[in-house]
Amino acid sequence: MRSSGDPDILPDNAPEVTPEAAPQVPAGHTEPFPAANPYVDPGQQYFTKQTSVDHFGSAQFSKNSTFQLRYFLVWPGTSPSASAPIFLFMGSEQDILSSDVGIGYYSELANQIGALQIWPEHRYYANEVPYLPYDNYEHLSVEQALVDHVEVVLHVQKLLGMDQNPVIAIGVSYSGALAAYSRIRFPDVIAGAVASSAILLGCPGLGVDPSFDPYAFAKVATRTASSEAGSAAACPRNVQSFFKELFALSNNSTGVELINQHMKLCSDSKLKSAQDTSGLASFLGELWVIGAQFDYSFAGQGYVANEVQAACNFLADPNLTGTDLLDAMSQAADVLLGNASTAIVGCLATSGFNNPTFSLSSGNVDAWDYQVCTQLVQPFSYDGGTDMFFDLPYDLDGTDAACFQYYGVRSQPNWAATNFGLSAIRQSSYIFFTNGFLDPLSACIPSTNISNTVTVALHDGAHGSDILKSRPASDTPGVIEVRRQAAQLIAQWVTDYNFNRNSIPFSNPANVFNMPYNLGGYTAAVNDTLAGSNLTRNTQVLSSSATQSNAAV
C-alpha cells in the first residue's frame, strides 16, 4: 500500500539510484564542474554541499553545526544557453538516492529546452550521517528547507557561471508547496514556480473564501468513488452503510466474530472487542482516501489502473446489506491494497493502524510525522453524513498531546496562515497551481485563478498526475492540456525574466556577494554584515555591476 505521507510516486520501470550507482566525484572535488567544451552531456552528477544546520541563528557560524546536503545535477542533451532556464526540483519526503531523479514530465521538458536540472535533498530525509542533522529534528522547518534550496541554487549558479539564468521551481504535494513558497519568499532567486497538487491551503486561517472546510478532503474522496468520477453509482452509499454495519456488529462478541470471518482478517488483525473497531475503520477509511489520491489512469507495482473504480465494482449492488457488505468490502480492500494481502498470505492484514485519532505511523518517529506535528497541521475530518465514511472530527488537542509525547513540541495550526497566507500568494506572481479532480488533496489547493500571474488548472487526473512521466497510452486529455499550459507559462516566464535582465540593471544574489559559498551562502551573506560575525571574506561586498538588488520579476 502506498503511504499518504509519500506522495511522489516512482514511475514504472524507473532506474533506482543507489550509492554505488551514483556518479563518482573526482578525489578532492565536492563541487560541480562545467561540462567539457565541446559539450558532452555528463548525464547525472551527484554532489554534496556543506550546509548550515541553522540558517537563522548563531549556530551557522560554527563549522561543527553543518551537514552535507546532497544534490544531483541532471544535464540536458545540448549545452544550456545563457538564456536557458534552470529547473529546481524541490526536495520531497524521501531519501534522494531512492527518489525519481531525472524522471517525469518536467525532466522531459528540461531536456527538450536545454535546461539544467538541480535536485536537492530535503534536510532530515537522508538516512545516514553526515547527510542529515542529528538533533531530534530541532531545525526541521519549511523556512530552513527553503534556504537550503536557495543556497544550492546560488552555489551552482556561481560555480557554473549561470548566475543570470532564470530558475523555475517545480514540486508536487509537499514539495509543490515548497515551490510556491520559494517564489513567494525568494522572488529574487526563483523566477517562477509550478506547484502540482500542492498542500498549500490545507490548514485553517488562510483567509480563503469560503473558509477552509475540514470536511472537504473526505467529500472529494467520496466524489472519486461516485458515478461523477466513473465509479459505480451505489458505491458511496454502500461504503457508508458498511461502516454503520461494522460499528453495529462490534457491539457484541457474535458480531465481532462475524466481522473477523467475513472481512477475512489475519490472526494478528482480528478484532478482539468493540474497542478494536475504530482501528479497523481507520485502516479501511485510509485505504479509500489513499486510493482516491493515487487513482491513476495506469497500472503500476502495487496498484491497478483506476483502482477506486475497480474497488467500487465489488460495491456496485444497491441492495447489499448485512454481512454481504463485509464480504464486498473485504474484496474492495484487497484491490486497494494492490491484491497484495490475500494473494500472499490468504487473509486481510491490517496491523499497524490502531490509532484513529492521530495518524503517526504506528508510533514510528520520522521526519514527516514531525512536520505534520508542527507546521503542516492539516485538520482533515469526516462526518459520515456528507461523506461515505464515519464520524471522526479532527482532534487538535489530541494531536497536540501526541506531538508533545513523541517529540516534545506543540502543534502550530496557524503557521501557514501567519507565514504564507492568501494575501502573500495574491501579492506574488508567476506561480502555476495544478491539481487533479480525483485527488482529495485538491481540497487544499487553490481552485480558481488568484491573479493574472498566479493561475490554477484542474485536470481529470489524480495526485501529481501532470508531473509524472509521459504515458501516451494512458495520459488523460486534461493532464496533457495542463502540461501544455505549464510549458507555455514557463516559456513566458523565461522570456519576461530575460527581457527584464537585459533592460533593467540587476544582479542575482549568486554574483552580488564575493564569497566562496563554502558555508552558509545566502544567509551568511546577509548575516555577515551584522556585528559579531566571525566569518571572514573580502571587504568588497558588492560587485561593480550590482547597481541595485534583484526585484521580483
Image: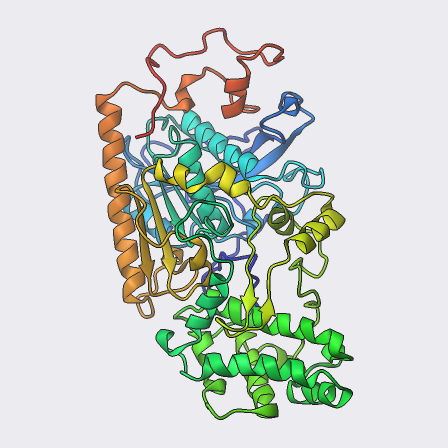
The image quarter in which residue 246 lies: bottom right
Residue 508 to residue 7: above or below: above
Q: What x and y, as percent, mark residue 347?
A: 66, 83
> Image point 57% across, 62% down: which residue?
3
> Image point 50% across, 36% down: which residue?
146
Q: What x and y, as percent, mark residue 337?
A: 56, 74
Q: How is the image coloured?
A: rainbow
The image quarter in which residue 546 lies: top left
In the foreground, 155 or 423: 423
> Image point 64% across, 49% down: which residue?
373
Residue 405 to residue 80: above or below: below
In the foreground, 343 or 20: 343
In the foreground, 318 or 495: 318
Q: Please state if 367 lies on the left or on the right of 183 as rendered.
A: right
Q: What x and y, as percent, mark residue 536?
A: 57, 11
Placement of the N terminus among the 4 image quadrants? bottom right
Q: Please state if 288 lies on the left or on the right of 498 as rendered.
A: right
